[in-house]
Image (cartoon, rainbow, N blue to C red):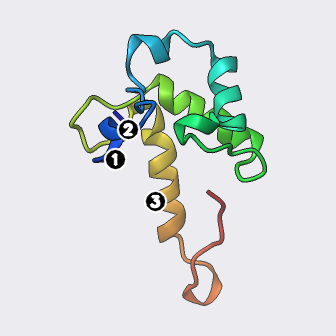
């Protein structure tokens, strides 16, 4: 089920488990298409125009490397990026201000 969505089982059609074989059997291109265009009757929104192309591909990568059910941590593939982000947050710029960065 979708993480953090307590009513996911009651939706029609039901929200798929992103770690399921059915979802994992999609090609990367198919997952990208779904993220970009959405699936109207399922409640899956289209992210085209909201997310940049590289962000949509990162979502595909995330789906391919989901953390274990019940874990609170980020998938291993994202740990280095998370550490870089935290370092950017801590790095002071002139006058003690944080350096700007993008997500």
What is the spatial separation of the Cα atoms under label 2 and label 1, in whole angstroms?
A: 6 Å
Q: Nearer the viewer, mark 1 or mark 3?
A: 1
Considering the image in quadrants, where does the C terminus appear?
bottom right
In this orientation, which residue lies closer to the viewer: 65 or 83? 65
Considering the image in quadrants, where does the N terminus appear?
top left
Q: Is residue 84 above or below residue 55?
A: below
Image quadrant where residue 34 sits:
top right
Query: Residue at (56%, 28%) from the top-left corner?
Result: 61
Name the residue tied to disc 1. Answer: 5
Name the residue tied to disc 3. Answer: 86
Mark 1 and mark 3 in contact? Answer it, CB < 8 Å. no
Name the residue tied to disc 2. Answer: 2
Query: Residue at (70%, 19%) from the top-left corner?
Result: 29
Q: Position of residue 85 (x, y in %)?
A: 51, 56
Q: For residue 73, which numbered disc appears in the image?
A: none
At label 3, counting other C-alpha atoms closer than 10 Å, the crowd grade (few under 14, some 14-19, many 20 or more) is few
Q: Earlier in the sequence, mark 2 or mark 3?
A: 2
Furthest residue toward left:
70
Mark 2 and mark 1 in contact? Answer it, CB < 8 Å. yes
Query: Residue at (44%, 26%) from the top-left corner?
Result: 65
Q: Nearer the viewer, mark 2 or mark 3?
A: 2
Q: Is residue 29 above or below residue 96?
A: above
Query: Residue at (42%, 40%) from the top-left corner?
Result: 79
């Amino acid at each position: 089920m979708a993480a953090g969505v307590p009513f996911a089982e009651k939706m029609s059609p039901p929200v798929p488990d992103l770690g399921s074989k059915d979802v994992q059997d999609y090609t990367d291109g198919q997952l990208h298409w779904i993220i970009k265009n959405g699936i109207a009757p399922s409640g899956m929104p289209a992210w085209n125009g909201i997310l940049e192309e590289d962000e949509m591909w990162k979502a595909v990568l995330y789906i391919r490397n989901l953390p274990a059910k019940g874990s609170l941590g980020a998938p291993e593939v994202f740990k280095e990026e998370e550490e870089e982000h935290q370092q950017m947050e801590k790095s002071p710029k002139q006058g003690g201000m944080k350096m700007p960065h993008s997500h």
